[in-house]
């Protein structure tokens, strides 16, 4: 009899340990780790709107290729309904994990609850959602966009510290409703508020594209005769603004100064050439960290709910020095 009780106790202990080790908690690892070549991850990308996005896609695809983990990939052409469709398709296919960069902050609870009900953990990369229910995703890996806006604002504050007359600023916003657009505007406004001479006289969305930045800047030049500085939420809109400024017979970087965010190669070249005056880096290289998150979850581990990417800023001299080794 004693022997039987011993075996039952050992069996129940093993079950408990397995439960602890699996500790599902939405990590999808209840049944224990899979071999990496058995894992399938669904990634719903925003689109291909900018140099940053292209670099982000390339890096994520290369990282999963190197890890030997299957990546199902979709491009939503910057449409939320396409991202939601892609996520639903990944749920139907029964992928092990879903990762995506939400094109806008709102409208995700329904589809994320469907993923949760299917026991498929979700990782946010690059952009955030504004959901109150933080159980809908395991981790958010990406930049601090408010900090990026503050860095841009600080450069403007320093640049015009000794100016006593009004400084007219126009802002080229990213995609309406997108976390980087909302937060980069907020961080910038917070900092420039320290100097009442610094005023954003007009702010429009260029949707993070070069064409959008050019179009909006053309209109702004027509309606505002004396613009001193452009703050563009990404390099691509800043590069579009350069085209519009030059077409208007003005010298970008001198007649009208330009501050942007991203630090992709084309933006860094314009900075080195003196057409952009300052760039705040936003790294698109999230692939390796995303693979690490998936591997940790697959092993039944836990990951930080918020992982902030490292990034810096560039002046003209720094861009000239960094360009030869720039990966993207
Ligand atoms: C920021 C990213 C933004 C980039 C743009 O992390 O979401 O989207 O700044 C891109 O270039 O289009």
Image (spheres, rainbow, N blue to C red):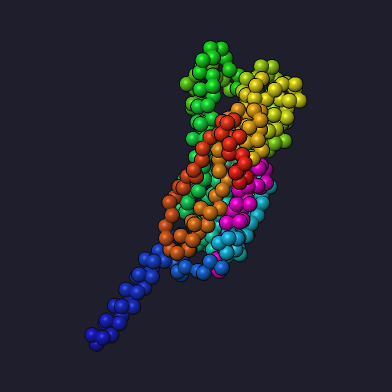
Q: Is residue 65 above or below residue 238?
A: below
Report the residue at 65% width, 35% height from top.
Answer: 269
Q: Residue furthest bottom?
A: 1
Q: Is residue 39 magenta?
A: yes
Percent of width and height locating residue 23: 40, 63
Report the residue at 75% width, 21% height from top.
Answer: 249
- Region rendered in magenta: 38-63
Percent of width and height locating residue 99: 56, 54
Res 240 → quadrant: top right
Percent of width and height locating residue 326: 60, 43
Percent of width and height locating residue 3: 26, 86
Q: Is residue 300 above or below residue 201?
A: below
Report the residue at 56% width, 53% height from top.
Answer: 287
Report the residue at 43% width, 63% height from top.
Answer: 300
Q: Nearer the viewer, residue 319 or 87?
A: 319
Q: Residue furthest top?
A: 164
Q: Quadrant of the N terminus?
A: bottom left
- Residue 21 appearing in the image: yes
Q: Is residue 315 above or below residue 179?
A: above
Q: Is residue 218 left or right of residue 100?
A: right
Q: Is residue 2 left or right of residue 153?
A: left
Q: Is residue 278 magenta?
A: no
């Amino acid at each position: 009899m004693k022997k039987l009780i011993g075996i039952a106790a050992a069996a129940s202990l093993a079950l408990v340990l397995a439960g602890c080790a699996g500790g599902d908690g939405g990590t999808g690892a209840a049944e224990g780790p899979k071999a990496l070549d058995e894992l399938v991850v669904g990634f719903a990308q925003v689109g291909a709107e900018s140099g940053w996005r292209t670099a982000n896609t390339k890096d994520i695809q290369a990282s999963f290729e190197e890890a030997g983990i299957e990546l199902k990939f979709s491009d939503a052409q910057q449409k939320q309904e396409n991202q939601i469709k892609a996520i639903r398709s990944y749920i139907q296919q029964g992928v092990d994990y879903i990762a995506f960069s939400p094109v806008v902050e709102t409208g995700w609870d329904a589809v994320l609850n469907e993923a949760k009900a299917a026991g498929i953990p979700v990782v946010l990369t690059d952009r955030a959602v504004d959901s109150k229910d933080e159980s809908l995703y395991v981790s958010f890996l990406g930049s601090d966009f408010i900090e990026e806006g503050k860095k841009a604002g600080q450069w403007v504050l320093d640049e015009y510290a000794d100016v006593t007359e009004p400084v007219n600023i126009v802002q080229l916003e990213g995609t309406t409703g997108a976390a980087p657009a909302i937060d980069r505007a907020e961080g910038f406004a917070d900092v420039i508020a320290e100097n009442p001479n610094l005023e954003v006289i007009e702010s429009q969305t260029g949707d993070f594209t070069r064409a959008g930045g050019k179009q909006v800047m053309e209109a702004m030049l027509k309606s505002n005769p004396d613009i001193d500085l452009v703050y563009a939420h990404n390099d691509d809109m800043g590069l579009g603004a350069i085209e519009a400024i030059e077409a208007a017979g003005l010298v970008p970087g001198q007649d009208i100064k330009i501050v942007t965010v991203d630090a992709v190669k084309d933006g860094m070249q314009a900075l080195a050439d003196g057409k952009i005056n300052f760039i705040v880096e936003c790294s698109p290289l999230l692939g390796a960290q995303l693979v690490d998150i998936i591997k940790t979850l697959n092993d039944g581990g836990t990951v930080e709910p918020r992982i902030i990417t490292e990034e810096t800023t560039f002046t003209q001299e720094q861009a000239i020095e960094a360009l030869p080794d720039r990966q993207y």
